[in-house]
Amino acid sequence: ERIGIDINNMLYDTVENIVNTYDSPADYADLSLELLKVFAVETPFTEEEFRSMPKNEVFDRIHASVNEAFRRKSDRIIEIAMPVISEWVEKRDAKGRILVPITDGKRVFNIPADITETYNSKGKALLKEWHKAIMLVTIDEVWKEHLRELDQLRQSVQNASYEQKDPLVIYKVESFHLFENAMNTLNVKAVSALMRGQIFIPQQRAEDARLSSEQDRQQPAQRQPEVKEAMPDRPNDYSRYHASREQYPGSSAQRQAASAPQGEQQRTQPIINGPKVGRNDPCPCGSGKKFKNCHGRNA
């Protein structure tokens, strides 16, 4: 329910991290490139202004520009989707859940939304579903990668005992840094996808709309993707996701070795032979000869 607050906090934290990273007067070019890459916005000040502005003013202007761009992007999605939804509700009396294709420039998400709720909220319910989809996908990707990094760290810190260091202390420090990096990666990926969100229109349909007459352009419902009925909701099955590397060959033995206490060597199991046969005993092959004159001749 509070996903809007979470996204605003992510925008704030991402802008703050970028401003703190590129705080030198000589970093204007890198700052501009990072803003374009993450937020898809131009730098809201010139290089001369950047050199003379304090850091808090740089942050305020970038944050205001990012919020305005995010608001425009959200309004644009509503502007394109609402004519289609309004037509289906008002003229066709449509009900239930529909799929609205929204893309972040790389992937296309079929966002399920209740058409009545979206119509009554003037598109805000659709935006909320879009935000939820991006957040869930991004959290899932980043968290699985974070668990893999922790697994690799757990194996690598075992060598710290040879340097007279406590592996547990190193693991705590390094895992905290990994978590910070994971949270920063989560913010950047989610914000970048949200700032590039738009209704997906196939290339041929977009080309036809560009070449259409003024009369056709006044009918946006004909240019939009067709509304599709959504399938019934299904619970998310996360059993197919593997956060660790248990499935890789040899990982079980490595985990057992890594989980062993430091300083404790692997115990070698003795090789157990069968009962020993004396030289003058009958040969086990059943020939009736002594063992030294039969199979034990070359022993």
Image: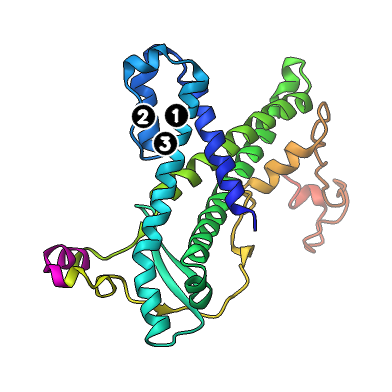
Q: CA distance from mark 1 to mark 3?
A: 6 Å
* Screen quadrant of the C terminus: top right
Magenta-colored span: 205-215
Q: Do the numbered discs 1 and 3 sit on residues whose CB atoms are within 8 Å?
A: yes
- Looking at the image, which is closer to me, 67 or 272? 67
The vertical placement of 68 against 117, above or below, is: above
Tag shown at residue 65? 3
Instruction: Say if the magenta span includes residue 189.
Output: no
Mark 1 crowdedness (10 Å alpha carbons): few <14, some 14-19, many ≥20? few
| Location of mark 1 (residue) | 61
Image-quadrant location for residue 221: bottom left
At a point 69% along the width and 25% down the height, the residue shown is 159
Say if residue 153 shows up in the picture: yes
- Looking at the image, which is closer to me, 285 or 48? 48
Secondary element at tag 1 = helix
Q: Is residue 204 left or right of residue 58?
A: left
